Amino acid sequence: MGLGNWIRKQTAAIAIANSSISNRVLKGIPEDRLRVEMVSRDSSRGGKKSLSGKVKKSNTFFVPKEIKDWNDAVSLATDPERPSLLFLSELYENLMLDAHFMSVMESRILRVVRSKWDLVTESGDTNPDVKNLLEQPWFETFLYQTVMSKFTGIKVLELFDTDENGELMECTPMPMAHILPHRQEIAEEAGGEKGTSYVSGNLANYYIEIGNNGDLGILSQIATYILAKKQAMGAWLDHLHKFGVPPIIINTDNMTTGRQEELLEMGLAMHSNHVMVLQGNEEFTLGAVPQTDAFRVFKEFLDLLNSEISKRVLGQDGTTQNKENAGTYGSLKVMAEVADDRHESDKLFVKYIINKELLPRLPKISSFYTPLANLQFDWDESDELDQKEYVESAVKLATAGFELDVDELSQRSGITITGYNRPFSNNPTEEDDKGNSKKKSPTTPLK
């Protein structure tokens, strides 16, 4: 036997021995430790840094915006050659300071986030055992940001950071000002012209693009209403400053410039101190306040703008302006059904994104999510009765002769049940309120 053949045989024997030892070791490792071992071997990231870690952050400055700013931002965002979302991002951050818009927007978003859902197999059977893999804060953020893309336009969500078990820690929305949708890249600088691709390379599996290039969202359509609200409220404050406090008129026979300046300072300080020291024949009087109903002018205008915002976001304003415009139960029910149409549309949109984009790539991100393979996300459309309705339904079913699961009934109703009444033909009799005899139903203890 030559030296070369002997070395090759010894090398093969050592490899077989190492493989056998490795198999025995892995078989002895509990399932959670084995998963950690598998994740530690996962080199799909290639040691690369996430794109969110490369983004250069800057301070946020809230500068008053006008209709011209909206026009310029939309024009730059829809530039066919070099679109930029920088100014649109700054505009949206400013518009989201409006409390009414944020309320109606989140009422639509959170209704989807709080809806019940299931993971189902190809045959339609639910699989509750793996549902806890998605019942995490990062998934709630994913749902929130997915629906929010209908208001802000295109979004890019990062699913990168995992813990030692390979479980995702967070879902990070990429800053809008850094997204280059026409190039499908993330720029390091806000408003940059070039960046790193999020659809190719080693990092492609960790980024999900939601929305279409050129779609600026609902917020771009109602921006003029919100900007008009800001201007109206500014005008209202200006009106209060000028006409809400009676003007001070000072009369003096001292014509020197120095004394006039002193009296002017006294008049300005009078608004807050209510103290003035005069000399000789000097006197001050309070002027008349305008009697026009400025409150109604501004209030009705703001209500009109809020109504228009509600109609665009929810399809109606009956559930948001009900205090001012109270309607019948039937009319409010119809308006609620209009909002339900948008809710169903949002759910269908989210379901498509999860099944098309999220679930297929989670096992690629980490072996922790391997159990999700071949599963589909679906909304649970079953109605869940409240406690009162549940007890009433249980009573009706029991009266009709159906046998109920008393353990489940006790648990869901919150009432401790120790027995139930069952009529028998040989029951002893007792008298009712009118003196007539009736059969008595003994209490049968639960087994």
Image (cartoon, rainbow, N blue to C red):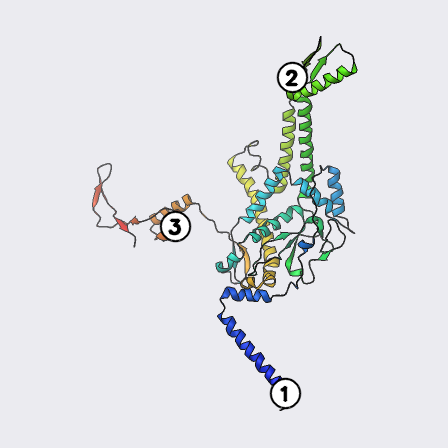
Which residue is tagged 1? 5
Which residue is tagged 2? 275
- Direction from residue 411 to residue 321 in the image, left or right: right
As drawn, 277 above or below 1: above
Pick the residue in front: 427 or 16. Answer: 16
At label 2, the amino acid type is: Val
As drawn, 203 above or below 257: below
Q: Nearer the viewer, mark 1 or mark 3?
A: 1
Count the numbered circles shown. Answer: 3
Q: Earlier in the sequence, mark 1 or mark 2?
A: 1
- Return the x and y of residue 75 as percentages of the image width and height: 76, 45
Q: Residue furthest bottom?
A: 1
Which residue is tagged 3? 411
Where disc 2 sits, the SS reads: loop
- Direction from residue 105 to residue 429 in the image, left or right: left
Q: CA distance from mark 3 to mark 2?
A: 70 Å
Q: Earlier in the sequence, mark 1 or mark 3?
A: 1
What residue is rendered at 65% in x and 26% in y? 297
- Return the x and y of residue 130 as percentages of the image width and height: 51, 60
Q: Nearer the viewer, mark 3 or mark 2?
A: 2
Where disc 3 sits, the SS reads: helix
**Residue 374 visible within the image:** no
Q: Earlier in the sequence, mark 3 or mark 2?
A: 2
